[in-house]
Amino acid sequence: MKNSIAERVFDFLKNYPPFNLLSKDKLMDISKEINIIYLEKGKILFNQNDTNHNHFYIVRNGAINLYKNLKKEKILIDICDGGDIFGLRPLISKENYVLDAIANEESIIYGIPIKTFEAVSENNLKVNKYLITSFASKSFDPYTNEQNNNIFTDYIVKDKLKYSNLHSVNYTKKPLSCTVNTTIKEAAIKMSNQKVGCIVVVDDKDIPKGIITNSDLKNKIATGLFSIDISVKEIMSSPVITQTKKLTVLDAQLQMIKQKVGHLCITIDGTNNSKLIGILNNHDVLASLGNNPTVILKEIKRAKRTNEIRKIRSKANLLLKSYLEQNIPLSHISKIISEINDAVTIRVVELALKKMDSPPPVKFTWLALGSQGRKEQLLYTDQDNALIFEDTTTENYLETKNYFLKLAGHITKSLHKIGYEYCPAEMMASNPKWCLSLSEWKNQFNDWIINIDEKAILLSSIFFDFNAIYGDTDMSKELTKSIFKTLNEKSLLYTFLGKEAIASPSPLGFFRQFLVENNGDHKDSFNIKKRALMPLINAARLLILSNNIFEINNTGLRFEKLAEIEPQNKELYQSCSYAFKALLKFKTKQGILHNDSGKFIKLESLTKEEKLKLKRCFKPIREIQEVLSHRFNLSNKI
C-alpha cells in the first residue's frame, strides 16, 4: 500500500538541495520518516540556547523568522521561505541553538530526522559538501557566541549612543585573496583554513577582479554545476562593488541595498582599478537595536496584507527617530527612508494586482508625485500619485481605463490604511483626471505648459517631480522627453513658475520677526513648509528645469548640481542645499515630537537657540529669490 503522505513529502523535497542530490530510494526513506509540524503565527520552534533537537528543518509552507536575542532585544536575522533549510547546528556541530526560530505566519515545517538522514547520506560527498558549506555560511555570520560581543558592541545604547553611523565602518583589513589561476578547490581550502566566508580574486597588482562567497560554493559547486578543479574565474562574481576606507556605516547599508550584494571590497581610492585593502560584509553594518533597513525591506517584500505592511512601516519611523537622534546627515536619512517608502508602494501595487479579476490589459506605470517623487518624504504625508497606461484602441479605451481606476482605488485605499492620508485635492491615481493614457498625459502637460493659468502652474509644478515607482518606466521617460520638448519650444512657463517661486516672501518680517499665520486653526503658528521649504523647492525645480536637466528630482541634489554647472553661484546654491536639509530635518523632528506633520510650529515651544538656527536658514531664501527675479525678469518685488 502506497504512503500518500510520504509521496507528497518526496515530491516537495526532490526540488530542493541537498535532497535533490539523493537517489529516489534514499529520498523516499527520508520522506517516510519526516516529522510534519504545523505552526501558528508566533509559535516558537526552538529558542536560543535550547538543547539541540533530533531534527533539522525545511520550510514547506509559510516562513520562519530567525532572531538573535541581545540584552532583551530581539534582532531579526533572517526570514526562511519555502525550501529554505535551517536549524543545522545539531546535525553539523552538535551544539545548542544560537537563534530563536519563530513562525512569521501560519507555517508547515518538515523535521528531517538526523539519524535517518545521516544513514542515507553517509557516503554522498555532494550532500555533505552542500550541508557543510550551507552551515559554514551561517557560522561565519556574527551570531556565534564568541563573535557576538565584538559585533554588537557598536550598537549597544547605554547612557548615550556609543557609536555613530557616520563613523567609518570596521572592515577586515587583510582580506583573503587568490589569483585567477587558483582552482576553486584551492580557494575553498584557503577559506576553510582561515574560517572566512569569501575570497577576493585579484590580479598581480592586487586589483580586485572578482569575489567568491560560501553561497557560490554551495550553489555552484556542492550542487555539481561546476567542477571543483576549474579556475575560480569560472564562478566568481565580477565586477566587484568597491568603496573607500572612509565609507560610513550608513553608506555601506545603502550600497548593499542598492547593489543587492553582501560584500563590498575596500580599495585605496574606492574604485575597482586600485589595490585591494579590505573587505566588508553585510553583517558588519547591522543597524542599532535591530532596525536594519535590509531586514525591513525584506519584511515588506514578504508581507501579504496591508496591516502587516503598516506594522513594518512603523519600524521605519523608529529608524528615522534613531537616525535623527544620532545626527545623521539628512541626505543619508532620505535615501534610506525613500527606499522603504518605495518598497511599501511596490508591495501595495503587487497585492492590489492580485485582487483584480485579470492581469492588466496593457502596460502601466505608477508614479509618485510631490515629496515622495522628490525622495523627501520622511514622515507620513498626504498621497500624491498618478498612473500612466499604454495607449490602446478607441474601442478598448473605456474598459482599459476602468480597469486601472479600479486598480488605483485598491492601491490608494491600502496606502491610506498604512498611514498615507488621502490627498484633499484628490491628486491621486484613483481620480480619473490622474489616471490617463500616455498620449493623454502628453497632451495634458502640453496644455499646462502652453495654456498657462494659476491651476496649470500648481499642477505642473507637482507633476514635474514625478518618479516612476512600479511598472514600465519607459513610459515615464517618454513623457519626460515630451515635456522638455514642449518646454524648450514654449518657455513662458518658466516666468510663471518664477513668480510662483517668489510669491512667498522671506520668512522674516521687517523687524526680523517670524511671519506667522494670522487666522484659522493654526493662528500664530509658523508654517515652515509654506514659508521656508516651498520657496527652496520651487526655486530648485525652476532652475534645474531651465537648465534642461530632468534626471534629478531631489531638492538638495538639484542645488548641488546647480553648484556644479554654475560655479559663479556655487556658494549660494550650496547654502540653499544646506538650508533645505536643515529645515526639512527641523520639520521632521517637530513632527515626531508632536506626532503630526511638523508643518506648523508653535514658536513658543522653541528655544532661543532653535529660533536662531531657523533664522540662519532663511538668508539663502531671500538671496535665491533675488536670483530668480533677475534671471527671469520677474516684475514682482520680493
Image (cartoon, rainbow, N blue to C red):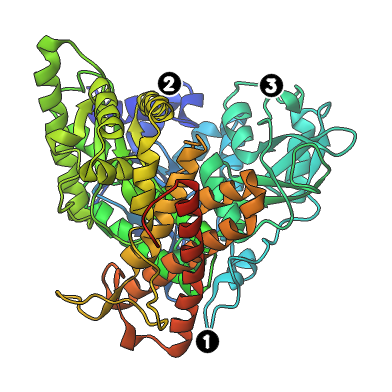
List the residue tagged with mark 3: 227
Asked whether disc 2 touches disc 3, contact meaning CB atoms under 8 Å apart, the reply is: no
Nearest to N terminus: mark 2 or mark 1: 2
Between 133 and 354, the one nearer to me in the picture:
354
Q: Is residue 300 above or below residue 67?
A: above
300 sits left or right of 419 in the view: right
Label 3 sits on a secondary structure element that is loop
Label 1 sits on a secondary structure element that is loop
Q: Residue at x 36, y 66 (%)?
A: 505
Amino acid type of disc 2?
A: Lys
Residue 24's label in the rendered image is: 2
Locate residue 180, reporting x and y percent: 81, 28
Locate residue 181, reporting x and y percent: 84, 26
Locate residue 318, reporting x and y percent: 38, 67
List the residue tagged with mark 1: 159
Q: Is residue 50 above or below residue 497?
A: below
Q: Is residue 5 above or below residue 110?
A: above
Between 46 and 430, the one nearer to me in the picture:
430
Amino acid type of disc 3?
A: Ser
Estimate how packed mark 1 is, as few (under 14), some (14 to 19) or many (20 or more) residues with alpha carbons within 10 Å. few
Asked whether disc 2 touches disc 1, contact meaning CB atoms under 8 Å apart, the reply is: no
494 sits left or right of 22 in the view: left
Locate residue 254, reporting x and y percent: 54, 50
